[in-house]
Image: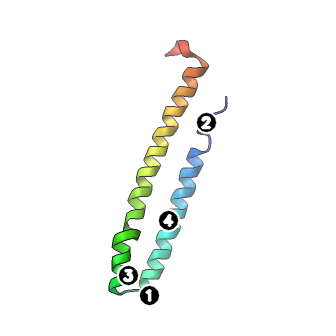
């Protein structure tokens, strides 16, 4: 059976790793860049990344579950 979501868990893991790396880079940058412009950038952009990625990760996990359920039902519709 070919799962339509076979790579979504891997995508979520890669997205989370890249998000953590980006957060580390922001932290390194903000160590040097400590003016009002840096604070505004952090407030407007950088601080929003982790919560949004968390929401995307949850949505992708839910999508995987739905697709897996549908794939099983398509294989054996009498079991539902």
Q: CA distance from mark 4 to mark 2?
A: 27 Å
| Residue where numbered disc 2 is placed | 4
Q: Secondary structure at mark 2?
A: loop
N-term-proximal mark, 1 vs 3: 1
The residue sitting at the right extreme is 1
**Measured along the vertical axis of the image, is residue 77 above or below residue 34?**
above
Residue at (37% x, 86% y) in the render:
34
**Residue at image coords 52%, 28%:** 69
> Disc 1 to disc 4, how far (Cα)?
19 Å
Q: Secondary structure at mark 3?
A: helix
Quadrant holding the N terminus: top right
Q: Nearer the viewer, mark 2 or mark 1?
A: 2
Residue 16 sits above or below residue 6 on the image: below
Give the SS element for disc 1: helix
Image position of 4 with respect to 9: above or below:
above
Residue placed under numbered mark 3 in the picture: 38
How far is disc 2 from disc 3 in space, using C-alphas?
A: 42 Å
Q: Please give the residue where the numbered disc 1 appears in the rendered image.
A: 32
- The residue lying toward the viewer, choosing from 1 and 35, is 35
Q: Position of residue 43 (x, y in %)?
A: 33, 72
Circles 1, 4 touching at the beta carbon (< 8 Å) = no
* Marks 4 and 3 close (CB-CB < 8 Å): no
Disc number lying in front (1 or 3): 3
Residue 62 horizontal/vertical position (percent): 46, 39
Apparent side of residue 73 relative to residue 36 in the rendered image (left or right): right
Question: Which label sits in the foreground, 4 or 3?
Answer: 3
Determine which of the numbered discs, if any, sits on residue 42 in the image: none
Residue at 53 percent of width and 51 percent of height: 12
- Compare marks 2 and 1 and give the one earlier in the sequence: 2
Residue at 42% x, 81% y: name it: 30
- Dot 4 corresponds to which residue? 20
Q: Earlier in the sequence, mark 2 or mark 3?
A: 2
């Amino acid at each position: 059976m070919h799962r339509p979501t076979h790579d979504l868990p891997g995508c979520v893991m890669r997205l989370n790793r890249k998000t953590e790396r980006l957060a580390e880079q922001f932290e390194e940058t903000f160590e040097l860049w400590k003016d009002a412009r840096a604070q505004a950038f952090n407030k407007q952009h950088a601080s929003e990344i982790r919560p949004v990625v968390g929401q995307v990760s949850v949505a992708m996990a839910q999508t995987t579950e739905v697709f897996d359920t549908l794939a099983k039902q398509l294989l054996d519709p009498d079991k539902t």
